[in-house]
Amino acid sequence: MNNIEIVSDIMLAVNLINAIVVLSMQVAAYRRHHHQSFLLLSWSTVLALLATATMATPMFVPAAHAWIGSIFITGACLQFFYAVLGIWGVASLFRSYAALRQGV
């Protein structure tokens, strides 16, 4: 295993830990506040984890190279949907905060 692979594996592990921590915070916030923004952000994070796992499959499963095109398309679709849900969730959170600040 060369240095690039080691750094890549470390980065993947750190990103996975980060995503799990963020997801747990989003789920806890949704349970506490029942606001749709936290639900949207939670689903966005789940899709981001699935997209990352999908795109990383060829790194860990050599037989997956035969399906590289399908893997790429699936990962790209998941990335698109997690981006849409993430933007929608953040926009919803910002609107809610603005309404709270205005006393509405």
Image: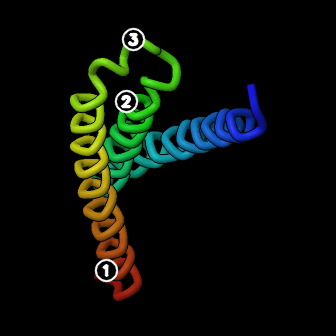
Residue 45's quadrant in the figure?
top left
Q: Secondary structure at mark 1?
A: helix
Q: Characterize the local packing of mark 3: few (<14), some (14-19) or many (20 or more) Cα atoms within 10 angstroms.
A: few
Closer to the camera in the image, 81 or 86: 81
Question: Of the residues under marks 3 and 2, which one precedes in the sequence?
Answer: 2
Q: Amino acid at mark 1?
A: Ala
Q: Residue at x 27, y 44 (%)?
A: 76
Q: Is residue 19 left or right of residue 71?
A: right
Q: Secondary structure at mark 3?
A: helix
Disc ID at residue 99: 1
Q: Residue at x 46, y 14 (%)?
A: 62
The image shows a total of numbered marks equal to: 3
Residue beneath disc 2: 54
Task: Look at label 2 and name its amino acid.
Answer: Thr
Q: Residues within 10 Å of mark 2 (few under 14, many from 20)?
A: some
* Sequence-wise first label, 2 or 1: 2
Q: x%, y% of residue 7?
A: 72, 40
Where does residue 61 sit, x and y in percent of width and height? 46, 15
Residue drawn at point x = 32 percent, y = 42 percent: 43
Instruction: Say which residue label 3 marks.
Output: 63
Quarter of the image for the N terminus: give it.
top right
Question: How far, Cα to Cα, is label 3 from label 2?
Answer: 14 Å
| Amino acid tagged 3 | Ala
Left or right: residue 28 compared with residue 42: right
**Which one is earlier in the sequence, the residue at label 1 or at label 3?**
3
> Dot 1 surroundings within 10 Å: few (below 14), some, or many (20 or more)?
few
